[in-house]
Amino acid sequence: MNNFKALYEQYKNRVYNLALHYVQNTEDAEEITQDVFIQIYEKHHTFREESSFGTWVYRITINQSLNFIRAKSRQKRFAIFSSLFHFNEGSLKHDQFDFNHPGILMEEKESMKILFTHINDLPVQQRTVLILMKIENKSQKEVSEILEISAKAVESLMQRAKVNLRKKLNQTKENEK
Amino acid sequence: MKNKVSNIDSMEKQIEKLKLIRKVETPEAVWDLLAVRLIKAQSMRLPVYYTYLAAACVLLLLSVNITLLLKPSSEANLLEVLLLNPSNMLYHD
């Protein structure tokens, strides 16, 4: 347990911050962090030393975050579905985007909330590349190692992410007009 | 055209803003809850190991039983005679 605590101390902030970028909510990020370390504890024997341990931890965090988001959206869909039959308005409130990212300054909060709404709409791989490169400041090579894809594929995903984001931001602007 | 360029500019600026997001410390409560979950996971493992052990014992007993049942009766009888009275071996020419 002591060894595991040391490992936790070494990687906790990396895991927590990456999870935060995916869910933009402290409670959810805390839950994902726990899930990630449970996975590490249970599956450490499956770690092949083909990549660094840090890369492996990143991979688990990304997968756990995406699984968490999928599970939550299933819950939301079910809540909406059941509210249609039970006329329960309370459950619809759960569908609201609960934006609570402590790493974002208060004055930037509103614009960042809009930006993250669009980032969350991006296809999974584009979203991951954008988060890793633009928020986590990872290089193209590092991202390609984490996602186990070529550097060219990373570049292309980044380009597509930018194009899609531009479209979405333009749509928002037009709607505001 | 100008509008398009300014749109690209604003989008790039927005993306650059992402770099301003600060790293935050993981709350202490996460470890406390994680430690509880780890202890639970460990305690859940023990009954599983015991079940495997019990299943292995049952399989072993069954296989011994089956081997004895399949043994030809004459051979089994001879073994029994020899085991019960080893002196019989003396008269065996």
Image (cartoon, coloured by chain):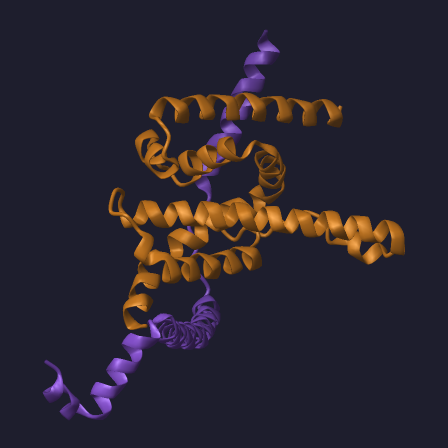
Chain colours: A orange, B purple
Above-or-below relation of B66 to A104: below
Question: Can residue A104 be seen in this snapshot?
Answer: no
Q: Which quadrant would the C terminus of chain A be assigned to in this image?
A: top right
Question: What residue lies at 43% left-to-right and 62% top-to-bottom?
Answer: A38
Question: What residue lies at 39% left-to-right and 36% top-to-bottom?
Answer: A147
Identify which residue, A133 or B80, lies in the foreground: B80
Horizontal relation, residue A165 to residue B54: left or right = right
x and y percentages locating residue A79 in the rendered image: 76, 53
Question: Can residue A31 be seen in this snapshot?
Answer: yes
x and y percentages locating residue A34 in the rendered image: 47, 62
Identify which residue, A30 or B88, lies in the foreground: B88
x and y percentages locating residue A128 in the rendered image: 47, 37
Horizontal relation, residue A27 to residue A134: left or right = right
Identify which residue, B85 or A152, lies in the foreground: B85
Number of numbered discs present? 0
Q: Quadrant of residue A150?
A: top left
Horizontal relation, residue A83 to residue A159: left or right = right
Q: Which quadrant would the N terminus of chain A be assigned to in this image?
A: bottom left
x and y percentages locating residue B55 in the rendered image: 43, 73
Q: Residue furthest top?
A: B1
Above-or-below relation of A55 to B52: above
Question: What residue lies at 75% left-to-right and 26% top-to-bottom?
Answer: A175
